[in-house]
Amino acid sequence: MDTVFDKTISGQPRLTELTFDQIDANASVEQIVAGFVPTPRFAQVSFDNYQADPTQPSQAATIVRLRQYLTTMQIGNETRGGFLRLRSRTPERIGPAGLYLDGGFGVGKTHLLAAVYFAAPTPRAYLSFEELTYTIGTMGMQASLAAFAKYRLICIDEFELDDVGNTMLAKTFIRGIMQGPSRFVTTSNTLPSELGQGRFAADDFKREIGEIAGAFETVRIEGDDFRQRPRDANQANVGPLTSATALQTSYQAYQPISKAKLYTTFQELCERLARYHPIHYVQLLDPLEIVFVEGLDTIENQMVALRFVHFIDKLYDQQVKLVVSAICPLTELFAADYRDKGYAKKYRRCLSRLHELLQESR
């Protein structure tokens, strides 16, 4: 499709239509580290605007525990008084090194994680587990430990052990950070003791997984997925899906407000995602306001499926609108031979977020 320009308020031309070839998705590790803050979707959250389900007491109780945890951070900052405080301003750690927010998708764990970040004393960092592993892999363990040691609080979203490599990496990183006063709060869909189950020979790494789990106090959050109507984790009930013809018409009619729009086929999207490490999907989406995807179909290859899951996560986090046409029902987007195995929770979370994205775009 031809490139289209518009005028911004300043009078400078602005691209309103883009193709993947026009987007530079490369970023240095320094640029990525500089972005360790809550994503646009969670940039304005707090404990006060978390809507706890009154039928699920654990949700309100989690807020109380998180506030208590933050209070111990403040107390730890004040315990070094007199002569010792003059010599060292490093706060002492009081209480557990980390809190592990465990619960199903759609109960508000990421909202609460971002709320903790905003309420915590500085300096602080907020990132996904994937971003953490990428940073360590790029910078090296010692440089990463030195970089993260300056933070009072490290918030890690979607903590999960997918293979032996990131299990050993996570153990070494947590052990190193715990030598100082830094704290952790993390979210996950999997109990600490069950990390890695169904993905690799986790039983052979019980000691390592046990050491990781031992760094955290588990806080369980019960509840249903608020994104689902009806509340069924296996459905993405968004009504009749847009046809390919209607999708093209919607694309032509859509007028971007601040960024650009992009039209792609599902096949082209999957091929493009394979060219980048998922850490760079944010840069791929950064200039976009909305993405139109034609022809969603059952994904037979699990590696392609996992890349698509990461893509939906970033669309969701960055609040980029999504409109799609589909050849198959969304419940059949992930093939039956893998969707209920080791990564089943990731696929269900993806359908949940896909459901919300499509509802928002309507």
Image (spheres, rainbow, N blue to C red):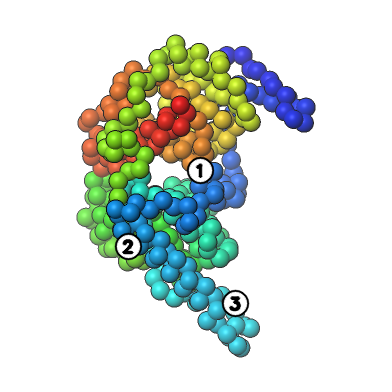
Residue 219 against residue 23 in the figure, above or below = below
Residue 201 seen by the camera? yes
Q: As shown in the figure, which amino acid type bears the numbered disc 1?
A: Arg
Disc number for residue 114: none
Q: Quadrant of the N terminus?
A: top right
Q: Earlier in the sequence, mark 1 or mark 3?
A: 1
Q: Is residue 255 left or right of residue 219?
A: right
**Residue shown at the point (35%, 43%) measured from the top left:** 226
Q: Position of residue 329 (x, y in %)?
A: 30, 23
Q: Is residue 74 left or right of residue 192?
A: right
Q: Earlier in the sequence, mark 3 or mark 2?
A: 3
Q: Which residue is mark 2?
A: 218
Residue 329 against residue 311 in the figure, above or below = above
Q: Position of residue 101 (x, y in %)?
A: 36, 57
Q: As shown in the figure, which amino acid type bears the numbered disc 2?
A: Thr
- Badge 2 crowding class, 10 Å Cα cut-off, few under 14, some 14 to 19, many 20 or more, is some
Q: Position of residue 94 (x, y in %)?
A: 44, 75
Given contact means CB atoms under 8 Å apart, are the residues at marks 1 and 2 in contact? no
